[in-house]
Image (cartoon, coloured by chain):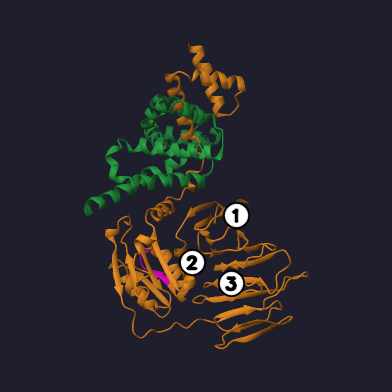
Amino acid sequence: MVELSRGSDGAFRELFDTYYKDLVLFAGTYIRDLAACEDIVQQQFVNLWEKRGEAGVILSLKSFLLKSVQNACLSELRHLGHENKYAEWMAETPTIYARETEEYIFYSELQELLQEALEHLTPIQRKCFEMNRLQGVKQQQIAEELNVSLRTVELRTAEALKILRSYLKHYFSLVIFFLQL
Amino acid sequence: MQHEETRIDELIDRYFAKTLTPAETEELKFWLGDDEHLRYFLKRQNLYDACHPAFSPGTINEERAYREIQARLRPVRRLFPWTRVAAAIVFLAIIIGGVFLLVTRENKITVQPVAQHVTRELPAVTLTLSSGEEIVLSDEKSREIVADSGTVARGDKKQLTYASSANVEDSVIYHELSVPRGGEFFLELSDKTKIWINAETTVRYPVKFARGERKIFVDGEAYLEVHRDTSAPFSVVMARNEVTVLGTAFNVNSYPDMEEDRVTLVSGKVRVYSGKKGEQLILNPGEQAVIQREEGQMTKRLVDTGIYCSWKDGTLVFQNNTLEEILRVLSRQYDVEVYWHDETLKRYTFSGELKRYDNIDEVLKLMGYTDDVKFTLHGKKIIVARP
């Protein structure tokens, strides 16, 4: 019994480490107040822990947490009397959304995805891409810094974009929003 | 079809950019009536959100959040069921190495108080008058404090009571009390407000308050029981933040070496102002405002006020506090310096309750029983190391 509980303890901490930050950012899509979001997410973890005896009922922790954070946010918005278009749409079609939660991509997951995609580039492609697109360095400046021609920088950046675009094709909109390709 | 998709993508883009006209909003809403369309939209929304986090991810303090969850999970009553009964018994409930959800993992240690109780010698408190003159309060017996306008207060080395007085029209005269490390003091102001002042704290206050306003300055930690006077609100000004009250009891903690200011309300109602953000919030009894030093971010939570206010009754309560936090408090209370032989020990957490008048070596001995950490006391220095 002790061993079991001890295991749950570790699992709880792990769960917290995995999801806390992302869930706060998720809550932030509803409520633009960090303190309120942290409060909501913390309460969901408390609820989860207190329900741990019934854990068998929870099929997917990710879906469960997302769903409970979402519900808490929507109820907070209602409480505040805020009209929110997005919330309205959500409320009208709750079942659809529930199906989607398992596929929801968290901030940190997206970061990982991008890192993974970057692994597919050659060092020079990656360097050109990161400096230009992620750090906003002008191509001329990159050319000077890397001691290559401007043409080379342009070519390598374009290659990098092409590779990333094909790698990330499942995340079509990521390409648009994140990398502004 | 291709045309329609492009059109919808544009609408969705502009929805995120918040540049849709009402007519276009209706158009998008209509399009979303289809399940497949909604799924597509949600995916886009998801990725947009993931790329544009509402808050900078770096500002989310996970360690603090985890501690707050711990606090919500385990009310202190359950942790210390027999503390009231065994008031005379000093004990430390120790929880080892960061796993603290489980009551079964606590090692409770009970120790009878040492027979020869060596009373701690309290360091003298300094009172600075408006003239700049300093008076060292070291008298065993009560004496009169004669200042600017005649006799204003009576007190000894442990407490000072100002003559009660009506509020004045003209400019107010300030006195300042400095309680050093290892000290503590009780102050009663001219409006009968009672203030318990903790170690390493300075309080600045008028000898007589101005009409319509009572304002004092606290740098450090103090517990206040404000005498109710609806005609003159009472404000406590900290280095960065401010609390306004009518009649109430609360604790302010604003030590400069802490990451946050904390205002804990026991009774009544207070309004807390965050200096940095210009925000304010109202606390109800049992609530605590935590104001981040760096960002001025203010949050409210329910707490067991006893944990934060019991110091005034000579008890120190720790609940899942890190060793670093505990030793910071102890070094203030006992005026000792802490040296970390192993920095990783700072993150160990302990819970427990101890009488403030115990000798520091007794306290350290109790914590040392965990076999996780070893304390060596050299005069006024504590060395923290692995055993």
Q: Which residue matches tag 2?
A: B309
Q: Nearer the viewer, mark 2 or mark 1?
A: 2
Q: Mark 3 falls on what kind of element?
A: strand
The hue used for chain B is orange
Q: Residue at x 43, y 51 (%)?
A: B65
**Which percent across, then down, holds residue B203?**
61, 71
Q: Which residue matches tag 3?
A: B194
Is B295 situated above or below A74? below
**Which percent across, then down, holds residue B91?**
33, 71
Q: Is residue A128 visible?
A: no
Chain designation of label 1: B
On screen, residue A75 versus residue B101, left or right, reads right
Q: Residue at x 38, y 64 (%)?
A: B323
**Which segment is the magenta one?**
B338-343
Identify residue type, mark 1.
Ser
Q: Residue at x 57, y 20 (%)?
A: B26
Who's green, chain-wise?
A
Give whichever of discs 2 and 3 has the lower sequence position: 3
- Residue contact at pointers 3 and 1, CB within 8 angstroms: no
Identify residue type, mark 3.
Lys
**Which percent across, then down, holds residue A87?**
50, 31
* Cα gap from disc 3 to disc 1, whole angstroms: 24 Å
Q: Residues within 10 Å of mark 3 (few under 14, many from 20)?
A: some
Circles 2 and 3 on the same subunit: yes
Q: Which residue matches tag 1?
A: B274
Is B296 situated above or below A125? below
* Cα gap from disc 2 to disc 3, whole angstroms: 14 Å
